[in-house]
Amino acid sequence: MLDNKGFDLWSKNYDKSVNLSEENDKYPFAGYRDLLGTIYSKIRCGQGKKVLDIGIGTGVLAKRLYDDGYEITGIDFSKNMLTVVKEKMPNAFLVEHDFSQGYPEQLAKEKFDAIVCTYAIHHLDDDQKVIFINELQNHLNENGSIYIGDVAFERVDECEQCKIENAECWDYDEIYPVLETLASRVKNISFLRISHCAGIFIISK
């Protein structure tokens, strides 16, 4: 699994790498644009303008919302990724932080209308995911929602089948979220399938 220095090195070519996988409809980024587009549309249909993007990366989704007048707060552990984001969104509030260490103290008193985490939560194990998601719910405004998009599955056996089919390129350091393992431990969670290896978890307050 890449650490923050690895993501610093990847920052310039990240979007190209994602697009190549997405265009070929292959794991891990098959459905990437549809996934981001769906989250974008759902946030636009909601209320309020405050958005927190966890693992903001190069800011592909956040930039669309930023251009629509949304107030963007972004978290990433890669300084170079945040430099890219700052160039795109000079008025965004950015925090250099590794969310595997928990929710950042700088944002302890903040609440948001939408919280987004795309292709990042797989760095947490299942117990950490549950703790983190439940913490995020405390930072939602009334009628707010959390949107987690990732390599994701409804059932454990679907994840295992995808692993078998992509054994040569499967990232064994990443722990992909599965509704079957989260549903009993996270309140108000639903799952929207986007592609054969991607989906969105929607969690309301």
Image: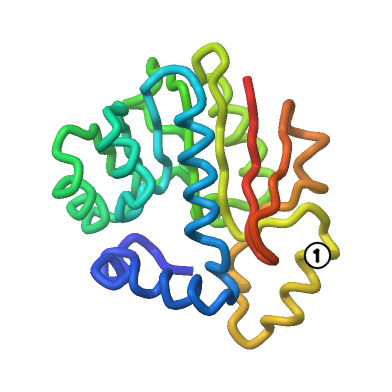
Q: Residue at x 64, y 25 (%)?
A: 204
Crowding near pointer 1: few (<14 within 10 Å), some, many (20+)? Answer: some
Q: Which residue is at the front of the view, 132 or 170?
A: 170
Kindly state the secondary structure of the residue where label 1 is placed: helix
The relative height of residue 107 versus residue 79 in the rendered view (above or below) is above
Which percent across, then down, holds residue 78? 29, 55
Q: Which residue is at the front of the view, 63 or 116?
A: 63
Q: Is residue 201 left or right of residue 61?
A: right
What amino acid type should be assigned to the residue bearing mark 1?
A: Glu
Q: Residue at x 76, y 80 (%)?
A: 164
Q: Residue at x 45, y 33 (%)?
A: 103
Q: Residue furthest top?
A: 142
Q: Disc 1 marks which residue?
A: 158
The relative height of residue 101 versus residue 15 in the rendered view (above or below) is above
Which percent across, then down, holds residue 74? 33, 39
Which percent across, then down, holds residue 121? 55, 50
Q: Which residue is at the front of the view, 186 or 72?
A: 72
Tally the numbered discs: 1
